[in-house]
Amino acid sequence: MLDTVPLQSRFLDHADHYARWSGLAIGTEAARQLVTMRSGDITMPLVFAITAFGLCAVGGVLLGDALTLRPQEAVRTASLAPRLVRDQVPPRMTPLLLLQAASLVALLVIGAVTASADPGQAGRAGSVLSVTCEGLRTSLGPWPGLYYSGPMFAALAVGTPVCVWALRRIAHGPGDDQQRRDRAWAITGAWGLLVSTQVLLVAVMVLVALTERACAGPLGAAAIVAICPLSLLGLFTFGWSLVTVVAPRAVDDEAARDGIPDDE
């Protein structure tokens, strides 16, 4: 028997999947191109690559959400209880992602305050950490000062409000509970990719800078101890976010078990 479902209808049924996967694919390719571009500084192409990957992931998920078909109900019903964003997002992972984002902002601010200009490279203000080692002033880097953290701040400033707006639109928009929850989880996962990749990059930069020479001192050792758990958290949230963007329904049952109320 021939398939009577129009090709356009079948495409629209899965357009959100195609958009999410395309965002990841485009982000991966963009990151590859940026990493391999010629530059006198190996770190800055990596910063641009990580930032581009995260923004492309967010863009793909937002496009997929815009293309998601809403169910056509003969009779629409509504709940008297207001829908809240926190009822749609992952109840266990969202606090971890928020903690990770707060840690990232704190690291970038500390890096910007403590960074100084690289004396060996003109135009790189805020790219190294100046310390006194054996009575001599030396520079440790790369350091997440404004030279490197500028693109990261910009990506967070663009990606975070857009994701929050999308979550609010989903919470108050049409659709059944499971569909809204799937869409919200996908957007949360995309934002998690944006944050976790930057956390991992900053952690690597700090670890490389502080372990380059035995000049960091007690504060440097304490910073390394604090960075290691954050790096593990970043790896965990990156894996979760990637899986959630690819297949948000794969973790939907957990949300249902956590007692998220359904609209009647």
Image (cartoon, helix red, strand yellow):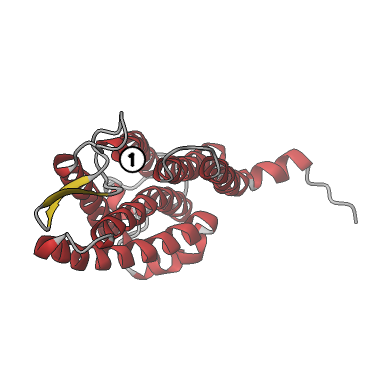
Q: Is residue 216 left or right of residue 259?
A: left
Pick out the residue farthest to the top.
123
Q: Could you tell me if residue 259 is visible in this image?
A: no
For the residue pair 66 and 74, the one nearer the viewer reads as: 66
For the residue pair 17 and 231, the one nearer the viewer reads as: 231
User: Residue 74 location, x and y as percent?
Assistant: 55, 42
Asked where in the image residue 150 lies, by quadrant, the reply is top left
Q: Could you tell me if residue 49 is visible in this image?
A: yes
Q: Amino acid at mark 1?
A: Met
Pick out the residue farthest to the right.
1
**Residue plotted at (14% across, 44% down):** 114
User: Residue 100 location, x and y as percent?
Assistant: 26, 56
Name the residue beneath numbered marker 1.
152
User: Residue 96 location, x and y as percent?
Assistant: 27, 60
Secondary structure type for disc 1: helix
Q: Residues within 10 Å of mark 1 (few under 14, many from 20)?
A: many
For the residue pair 36 and 97, the one nearer the viewer reads as: 36
Asked where in the image residue 221 lies, by quadrant, the reply is bottom left
- Of the 4 image quadrants, the one containing the N terminus is bottom right
**Residue plotted at (19% across, 42% down):** 115
Asked where in the image residue 230 lies, by quadrant, the reply is bottom left
**Residue plotted at (19% across, 65% down):** 226
Q: Is residue 103 left or right of residue 157?
A: left
User: Residue 69 location, x and y as percent?
Assistant: 57, 41
